[in-house]
């Protein structure tokens, strides 16, 4: 499988908000200080049943 060109990856990172992408997929995010936390409870993902943890999005490091 060919690798995705780095320029395309950087363009997508600049154009797509990870926060909005998570919310569009039904993943509930909660503010925790400067970060956003997605926990398994109420996340609305088809993988929630098998997911035993949480994801932390460090907002200051996310591209805008």
Image (spheres, helix red, strand yellow):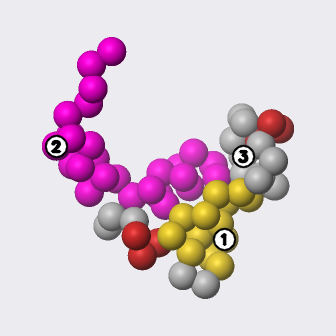
Residue 30 is marked as 1
Q: Where is residue 3 in the image (x, y as percent from the top left)?
A: 27, 26
Closer mark to the observer between disc 3 and disc 2:
2
The residue lying furthest to the top in this view is: 1
Question: Is residue 5 in the magenta section?
Answer: yes
Question: Quadrant of residue 50 in the image?
Answer: top right
Q: Main secondary structure of the magenta part?
A: helix
| Residue name at image x 77 percent, y 43 percent | 51
Q: Earlier in the sequence, mark 3 or mark 1?
A: 1
Q: Give the range drawn in magenta.
A: 1-28
Q: Quadrant of the C terminus?
A: bottom left
Label pair 3/1, CB-CB below 8 angstroms: no
Whether label 2 touches label 1, CB < 8 Å:
no
Identify the residue position indicated by label 2 in the image.
7
Q: Quadrant of the N terminus?
A: top left
Horizontal side of 2 relative to 44 (left or right) equals left
Gap in Å between the C-alphas at discs 3 and 1?
Answer: 14 Å
């Amino acid at each position: 499988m060919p690798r995705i060109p780095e320029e395309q990856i950087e363009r997508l990172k600049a154009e797509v908000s990870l926060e909005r992408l998570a919310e569009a997929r039904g993943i509930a995010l909660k503010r925790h200080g400067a970060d956003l936390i997605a926990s398994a409870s109420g996340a609305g993902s088809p993988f929630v049943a098998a997911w035993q943890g949480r994801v932390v999005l460090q907002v200051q490091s996310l591209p805008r």
